Amino acid sequence: MAGLPIAMTDLKKHSLTLCFFMSALIIATPSQAQALELSVAPFINYFHYQEFDDKGEELLNEVGPLYGIELALAGEVGRVQSTVELSYLIGEVDYQGRTQAGNPYNTKTQQNIIQYGASLGYRYAITEISGNTLFIQPDLKILAYHWRRDIKSKQNVSRLVEDYNGYIVQPSLIFNYSDYQLQLGITRTLDNSMTIQPSSCIDRVTVKPKSANSWFTQGEYQFFKNDAYAASIWVSYKSYKMHASEVESGNTCFGTVGWHEPENSMQLWQLGAVFTF
C-alpha cells in the first residue's frame, strides 16, 4: 500500500496526456473516421464565486458576467466519440468581502479562466421513439485549468493576484435524440494549487486546496443543418468546488502571516451558440 499514493500522483500527471493521445489517435485516422468536425462556440456566463469559513459561513462572493469562447475538434470512429477542446473566459465582476480587520470591503475582480483537455465516449442506441433513435453515451473528460483572480486595489487595501492551477475530471452521460442533446455529469477538481503573486508587501506563497466533487448539466438544440455547417443553441450549469488547504507561512511587510485557501465554490450559468463545420 505504500506505493499507492505515488501511483495515484503519477495517474493524475499522465491521465491528461493519455486522453489527449487517444483522442488525437482517433481524430488522426480520417480513413476510418465517420465524422471530423470543428466547432466554435461563443457564450456568456453568469459567474458566482464564494469562499466559506470552517463553520460554513460566507467570507466573500464575486458575481457578474463573463464572456467566453470554446474551440473543439471532434472525431468519430464507429461508436467511439473523441474531442479535444480549448476554452477561455474573461470579465470583471463585483467583489464583496471583508478586510483582515473584519471591515466590509467592496471592489472589482478581473477573472481570466483557461481550460483545455480531451474527452472520450462510447455511444450506443437505446430504442426507437417516433422514428428517431435515442442514443446514450458514457463519456469521460479530463481538463487542465488556469484561473487568475486579480482583486483590484481600493482605498488603503492593496491589489491581490491569485493564480489557480489544476485538473478537472468529468464523467458523464450524454443523451441524444433527434436534434436534442442532454448531458449530466460529476465534476471533481484534482491536484489544485493557488499561488499568491508577490507584490511590494507580499512574498509569493503557494497553497494546495483539496479535491472536491460537484456536478454539471448541459442541454443543446440544433436548429439548423446543411452540408456546410450546423448551428445550435445551448444552456448549461457548471459547478466546481475545492476543500480548504493547509496553512502556509508567507512574509509580508507586517511580518510573517499564515495563508490558506478556504472552502470555495464556483458556479457558472452559461448560454451560447455552437457553429459546427
Image (spheres, rainbow, N blue to C red):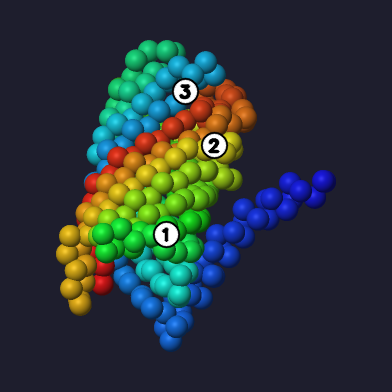
User: Residue 238, percent across and down?
Assistant: 38, 42
- At x 38% / y 60%, what residue is drawn? 127
The residue identified by callout 3 is 52
Residue 200 drawn above or below residue 272: above
User: Residue 207, percent across and down?
Assistant: 58, 36
User: Residue 44, percent across and down?
Assistant: 24, 46
Query: What amino acid is labelled 1 in the image?
Result: Ile
Determine which quarter of the picture holds residue 124.
bottom left
Residue at the limit of the structure toward the top, as seen here: 102
- At x 54% / y 70%, what residue is drawn? 21
Residue 90 drawn above or below residue 157: below
Query: What amino acid is labelled 3 in the image?
Result: Phe
Is residue 212 among what the camera can see? yes
| Nearest-to-viewer mark from 1 and 2 | 1
- Say whether disc 3 or disc 2 marks the residue closer to the N-terminus: 3
The residue identified by callout 2 is 212
Measure how far apart labels 1 and 2 are at the Cα level. Answer: 32 Å
The residue identified by callout 1 is 126
